[in-house]
Amino acid sequence: MFLAWKEIKYSKLRFSLIIGVVALVAWLVFLLSGLAFGLASVNRLAIDQFDANAIALTDESDLSLTQSKLLIKDAKTVTGDKTAYLGQSSGVVTSDNLDGKVSVSILGMEHDSFIMPKVVEGKAFTDEGEVLADISMQKKGTEIGDELNISSSDKKLKVVGFVENGKYGTLPVLYMSIPDWQELKFGQSDPTDNGLVSAVIIRDTDALNQTPAKAVKISNMADFIEKIPGYSAQNLTFSIMIGFLFIITAFVIGIFIYVLTMQKTATFGVLKAQGMTTGFLSKMVISQTFILAALGVLIGLGLTFVTAALLPDAAPFMLNDLNLVIYGVVLVAVAVIGALFSVASIAKIDPLKAIGGE
Amino acid sequence: MTLLSLDNVSKTYGSGHTEVKALKNMDFSVEPGEFVAVIGPSGSGKSTFLSIAGGLLTPSTGTVKINNQSFAGLKKKELAKLRFKELGFILQSSNLVPFLTVKDQLILVDKVQKKNLSKKKKEDLLESLDIIKLKDKYPKDLSGGERQRVAIARALYNEPSVILADEPTASLDTNRAYEVVKILAKETKDNQTATIMVTHDTRLLDHCDKVYEMNDGVLKQIR
Ligand SMILES: Nc1ncnc2c1ncn2[C@@H]1O[C@H](COP(=O)(O)OP(=O)(O)OP(=O)(O)O)[C@@H](O)[C@H]1O
Ligand SMILES: [Mg+2]
């Protein structure tokens, strides 16, 4: 640490540049992870709010909520500590207070079921024709009491309250009663056993352990979320980008440290002649890399927080403390791995060169 | 008491028609407080001799002992440890770590041996070499003579048995060269170390107790 620090203090400019490079890469990694996490969240937030273990869909739907049309007769065969019917579709909303059209995700549910979201403003819907909207709709101009028009339907829905985190498939959610949803999706409502819902949401740790009607398939929530359209492809894209950034970091730092080590060959040769071991000198280079990478990551983290504060609300950007810590640690680790390549060259430095040679 | 001894040491570089016999059956020893000079023409084997004496090069035959401890059969790491403990090196130039101040050059030694010499001892050493006022300077800000005095301080700092100096005055003008050799002679006496200095400059030999001449791999005492 002693030698490592002293050299950093002596060659401030040179080492500042390296720290700068690490900081920029770290910044990019953190921003990407924030976007990845943000995008992943807006795909699934409304589902996460259910705090459920499993979902029952039709077997033929292949875990697609949109494709699943479950007869209430079959839905009734699903059991669990708590169960709730869910209807899902999508639509485009217009209203006097909204400027332009807004795409929404529509979720239908019974107002007394456990999957009802927490209302942060106004009240929950109880009657038909009433809806709850995600708070982001408020920012777009919607107010409590507004009448919403849904595309391809002449039905009018009245906003009675707002909820937070009402996002599904990256769209804001309108929560409404099952009959309203049925009307929007099928043109008419049908409360009998022959009526349809999209799914049954189950809160029960042992939910998979049952035999419902033949048309029904029960899956873990996690498996279902993976199948949300675009969700896993999106995550994979970000993972690949971040993964490559880690590899690039290892190379960039490795090359920097290698060049610096080569420049110190004469000094290291003399130190070796004086009896300092390859291990001692390697420790110096590694601890130096550690200091540089750690400082760079901290600066990158600072830049990230500043950026997060400046980003427009519309950007699906969400920082996750655990992700930041993990990515930060991995960045430092790959930088150190990059520096390990220099250890071999330190081992090769011949102290003999110190005597009688230039 | 002998601090360093070379017993029937030979060194052959290469083999076949590229074979060079750089040292031929050499016997050599130094006692505490002795300041020995080695002169000789270029290519005669002086650096080879110092490298072998310093444990940086393994002789083809013969044994090297420092403080009665033989180099033979030591692992790389043990050899490095022995060098660190028993030897001080003073080289032509670039002997100092460029990014350490004069004071830090000595502190580095503390860090390696994990024991701190007292501050007083450090200051006394710098005082005796008349470089105490330079203690916060970097090597690039020192003159050639000052740099060599710092190198001497560094070499003396871990109280070695033997100091090996390879052309320590090569980069200095005559006056400064005299000054440095005088200091080296004094420190050798004061600390009862043994100092071996390879030099081209025959004018510096006045301060030495013994003078050897190397010729084609054969070492002969001439004074
Ligand atoms: N690594 C090596 N491989 C082959 N031959 C070598 C090697 N090192 C030195 N020699 C040869 O050994 C002989 C002695 O070399 P050495 O460097 O010891 O001479 P020197 O007395 O220090 O010369 P100078 O005064 O020029 O520094 C020379 O002939 C040299 O060419
Ligand atoms: Mg030489």
Image (spheres, coloured by chain):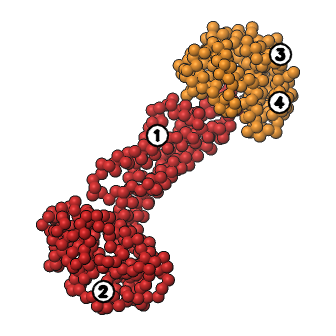
Q: Report crowding for label 3: few under 14, some 14 to 19, many 20 or more residues within 10 A (C-alpha).
A: few
Report the chain holding disc 4. B
Q: Nearer the viewer, mark 4 or mark 3?
A: 4
Report the chain holding disc 1. A
Which quadrant of the structure image shows residue A343? top right
Q: Which residue is drawn at 55% across and 46% down?
A: A336
For marks 2 and 1, give the CA distance.
Answer: 62 Å
Amino acid carrying label 1: it is Ile
Ligand 1 within 8 Å, label 3 CB = no
Q: Decide: marks 2, 3 in contact (CB < 8 A)?
A: no
Q: Residue at x 64, y 18 (%)?
A: B123
Quarter of the rendered image showing ligand 1: top right
**Residue with the mark numbered 3:** B221
Q: State whether discs 2 and 3 lie on one chain.
A: no
Q: State whether discs 2 and 4 lie on one chain.
A: no
Q: Report crowding for label 1: few under 14, some 14 to 19, many 20 or more residues within 10 A (C-alpha).
A: some
Report the chain holding disc 2. A
For marks 3 and 1, give the CA distance.
Answer: 55 Å
Left or right of A199 on screen, residue B145: right
| Quadrant placement of the C terminus of chain A | top right
Which chain identifier belongs to the orange chain?
B
For this orientation, the residue located farthest to the left is A96
**Residue with the mark numbered 4:** B64
**Residue with the mark numbered 2:** A196
Position above or below: B138 against A179: above
Which quadrant of the structure image shows residue A202? bottom left
Position above or below: A318 against A303: below
- The picture places residue B181, in percent across and down from the top left corner, at 69, 12
Q: Which residue is drawn at 62% across and 25% down?
A: B105
